[in-house]
């Protein structure tokens, strides 16, 4: 049995992710507040933080152009895993009571040999070869070699599934993609949304987007990258339809000119961004959408608080944090219909769903929300309630903590 507040006082937890704090931004502080000692090993962080000692690792090698296209990802995973091992060994991290790591980057692979400590992995997405054609948009089809490479990309996760004491996936849909032989080892638990931070701002002057002329409303879109996997080109087509419907709508897109997933570059002219490509296809001018780039969380809370409609248009892939952040801020949502979205948004309750390949139907659903402030408010309140009951830190962090506790016993 463990002693102290919730049994965590003095326990050493080693968290590993190539980014900081990534998916552990909520559970890390949660455990630290209960007396746990946190060491966070990462590739992309300089300096410490209030709740963890931060240790940097350097990749030990990595893929080269001479490596087979299918194995380059695995080569990079091994390089990261070796780097983590060497950093922990050389920087006096000390034996942890448990390791918590994101699988797929290979970060925790060799820590069982170094420490003999139990390992809990976050399993985010398992590729399925030909089945993954559903993930790619028909307008931007994958090459056969991309699908074949994806199968090889599961190698590190399969090693982690074998070595870990336990694992978890953020949604049941994500868990369902993993081989049946391992699903009993994977719990369903989201990373956790800070509903106090992601909360609708009220009161005069609370939002920098307030003060717009009477009747002007915001329609928002948020994605780390403005790309096909997250449906930016579909959003551009919906913008064209909605702008004809109501000239007092302002469209705001948050995100960078980067492709995080997929292979959009193959379909672009030299030097062209996917944002430019999508705007051109939709017949939009530069000023028809307000682009903010990447903005701080506080500014995003302000924006989502003022949003009359938030559109989340993604292929069937890992659900984005931005959807739950918008729901937590009570923004009424219109999202693309697929299995990943249907688990989070109940059609007609927290928002509306429509096919990603139907900009007309998406626009019709958007008009339905924009035409009824009463409906929009009801959807937003239900969205907030759903996040509070299923995805809030206070719900999710204790579940992850219990997985770690179980691994140590």
Image (spheres, helix red, strand yellow):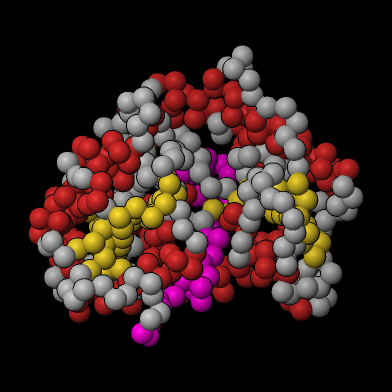
Q: Is residue 294 left or right of residue 232?
A: right
Image coordinates for residue 311, horizontal then vertical, percent: 29, 58
Q: With respect to residue 265, does 235 lie above or below? A: below
Q: With respect to residue 342, does 309 lie above or below? A: below
Residue 229 visible in the displayed image: no
- Residue at point 15% right, 56% down? 243
- Residue at point 21% right, 37% down? 281
Name of the residue lying farthest toward the top: 66
Question: Which of the pair 249/400 is nearer the observer?
Answer: 249
Q: Is residue 192 left or right of residue 41?
A: left
Question: Which of the pair 312/208 is nearer the observer?
Answer: 208
- Residue at point 64% right, 65% down? 27
Image coordinates for residue 292, horizontal then vertical, percent: 38, 55
Q: With respect to residue 252, does 379 lie above or below? A: below
Range of residues picked out in magenta: 175-204
Name of the residue lying farthest toward the left: 245
Q: Quadrant of residue 399?
A: bottom right
Residue 200 visible in the displayed image: yes
Question: Which of the pair 59/28 is nearer the observer?
Answer: 59
Q: Quadrant of residue 323?
A: bottom left
Q: Is residue 114 left or right of residue 316?
A: right
Q: With respect to residue 409, does 385 lie above or below? A: below
Q: Is residue 185 highlighted in magenta?
A: yes
Image coordinates for residue 71, horizontal then vertical, percent: 59, 23
User: Which quarter of the image is occupied by the N terminus?
Assistant: bottom right
Q: Is residue 269 left or right of residue 97?
A: left
Image coordinates for residue 161, horizontal then vertical, percent: 64, 42
- Residue at point 48% right, 68% down? 298
Prevailing SS of the magenta stretch: loop
Q: Is residue 316 highlighted in magenta?
A: no
């Amino acid at each position: 049995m463990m002693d102290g507040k919730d049994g965590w006082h003095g326990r050493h937890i080693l968290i590993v992710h190539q980014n900081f704090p990534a998916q552990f931004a909520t559970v890390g502080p949660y455990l630290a507040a209960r007396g746990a000692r946190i060491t966070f090993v990462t590739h992309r962080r300089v300096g410490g933080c209030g709740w963890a000692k931060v240790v940097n690792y350097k990749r030990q090698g990595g893929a080269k152009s001479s490596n087979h296209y299918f194995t380059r990802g695995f080569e990079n995973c091994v390089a990261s895993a070796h780097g983590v091992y060497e950093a922990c060994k050389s920087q006096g991290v000390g034996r942890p009571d448990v390791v918590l790591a994101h699988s797929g980057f290979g970060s925790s692979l060799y820590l069982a040999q170094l420490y003999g400590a139990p390992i809990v992995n976050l399993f985010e997405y398992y590729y399925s070869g030909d089945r993954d054609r559903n993930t790619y948009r028909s307008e931007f089809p994958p090459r056969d070699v991309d699908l074949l490479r994806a199968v090889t990309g599961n190698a590190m996760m399969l090693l982690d599934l074998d070595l870990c004491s336990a694992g978890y996936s953020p949604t049941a849909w994500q868990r369902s993609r993993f081989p049946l032989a391992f699903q009993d080892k994977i719990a369903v638990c989201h990373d956790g949304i800070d509903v106090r931070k992601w909360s609708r701002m009220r009161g005069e002057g609370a939002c920098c987007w307030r003060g717009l002329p009477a009747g002007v409303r915001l329609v928002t879109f948020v994605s780390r990258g403005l790309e096909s996997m997250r449906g930016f080109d579909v959003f551009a087509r919906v913008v064209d339809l909605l702008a004809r419907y109501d000239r007092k709508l302002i469209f705001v897109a948050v995100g960078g000119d980067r492709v995080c997933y997929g292979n959009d570059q193959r379909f672009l002219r030299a030097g062209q961004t996917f944002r430019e490509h999508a705007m051109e296809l939709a017949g939009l001018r530069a000023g028809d959408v307000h682009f903010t780039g990447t903005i701080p969380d506080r500014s995003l809370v302000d924006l989502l608080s003022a949003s009359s409609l938030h559109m989340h248009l993604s292929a069937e892939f890992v659900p984005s944090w931005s959807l739950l952040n918008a729901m937590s801020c009570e923004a009424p949502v219109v999202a693309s219909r697929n299995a990943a979205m249907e688990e989070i948004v109940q059609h007609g309750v927290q928002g509306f769903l429509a096919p990603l390949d139907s900009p007309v139907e998406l626009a019709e659903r958007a008009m339905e929300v924009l035409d009824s402030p009463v409906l929009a408010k009801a959807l937003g309140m239900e969205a907030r309630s759903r996040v509070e009951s299923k995805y809030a830190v206070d719900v999710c962090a204790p579940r992850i903590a219990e997985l770690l506790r179980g691994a140590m016993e």
